[in-house]
Every structure is written in structure tokens, then in C-alpha cells.
Amino acid sequence: MTHILLTISGHDRAGIVCDVAEALLDLKANIADSSMTALRGRFTMMMIISLAADQHLSDLKAAMAELERRTGLHVQSQIIDEQDATRCAPDPDHIITVHGADQIGIVHAVSATLTQLNVSIVDLSTQARHSDHGDIYMMVLEVVAGDQAEAMRTQLQETAQRIDVDIELHQLDDAII
């Protein structure tokens, strides 16, 4: 079985997911993991797929070229080895929310704090919004803190004060899900 990381992007419109899923269905490719989002009129998706034993990479490349031609999407593919394909992403145990005036360096400050504590970021989403009170920046992170939760809470509060944003830490448990 061949495992492939696909990255697909293009102008957002209804039907993109269906178009991609149909192209993969025709190949009998399985979508194992995926993440998809729309950002300012652009749509992007990443997915790990597996091809059936009777399918070849050339079949996938031909199908993706046809998808690009037909839809205007841009597709990149990368074969991943069996070890990476079967590796499970760590389950996040905390959610961090960041909110404040938009400014350069928020993502770096928060991620540097987490890196110092060896905390892994599993998912990160940001959004800048315009309001009557100025530009607001929001960020949500899912992280794996393990035994670093209290140190993370302390360090994040110091980071929040230093860059003048609000940072909240929530333990991810059944009550939040």
C-alpha cells in the first residue's frame, strides 16, 4: 500500500471537497487523515491517503492533473513511508486561546514559550478581525503538555503580560469536547 500526503489549494467555492473526494474515489484511494480550512477566500486541505495495491503513483498523478485542469485547484503530492503513515498524532491535552490587539510577533512569542517547555502544538488556528475598536487577533492552539501543564500556565501568563494579550489555558477533557 502506498501512502501519500496531498496538499490541495485554490479559490474557495462550494464543491471543492466533493471534487477532490470524487477524484480519490475513482482511484479507490482511502482518505485516512485530513485537515481543511478556508482562509480569506482561499481553500486549502492536507490529507494523507492510501492507494490500493492495484493503483500506482502514476494513476494518482494523472487523476490529480485532471482535477487541476478541471477545477483550477493546485495539487502537490509526497510519498510518505510506512512508519510515518502509521504514526498516530499525539492527543492534545490542553487548549490555549489567545486574544488581543493585532500585532506582529504573537505567534512567535506563544510558540517560543511552548517550545522552551517542549510542549507540542497539534493544531493552531489564527484569525485577524477588524472592529470599531481596532484590529483584534485571535489564536487557538491544541497542545500536548503532559507534565508541563503548570509550568506552561505560568510561562504563558508571563508571555501574555509581555506582549499585552489575554491567554487562557484549558485542560481538554470530556467536559470540553
Image: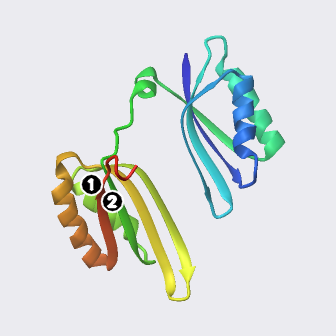
Q: On screen, 10 above or below 104?
A: above
Mark sitting on residue 96: none
Residue located 76% across and 41% down the image: 68
Is 159 situated left or right of 46 in this image?
left
Q: Position of residue 88 (x, y in %)?
A: 39, 31
For badge 1, the amino acid type reads Thr
Q: Position of residue 97 (x, y in %)?
A: 37, 64
Determine which residue is flagged by label 1: 115
Total numbered labels placed on residues in the image: 2
At 65% from the left edge and 22% from the top edge, which residue is drawn?
A: 57
Residue type at the position of mark 2: Ser
Q: Is residue 116 rendered to the left or right of residue 176?
A: left
The N terminus lies in quadrant: top right
The residue that label 2 is drawn on is 111
Disc 1 is placed on an element classified as helix
Q: Is residue 39 left or right of residue 135?
A: right
With respect to residue 170, does 103 lie above or below? below
Say which of 174 and 163 sits in front.
Answer: 174
Question: Looking at the image, is 122 positioned above or below residue 105?
Answer: above
**Percent coordinates x, y for residue 165 in the rendering:** 34, 76
Residue occupying the point 25% across, 49% down: 145
**CB within 8 Å, label 1 to label 2:** yes
Report helix, strand or loop for mark 2: helix
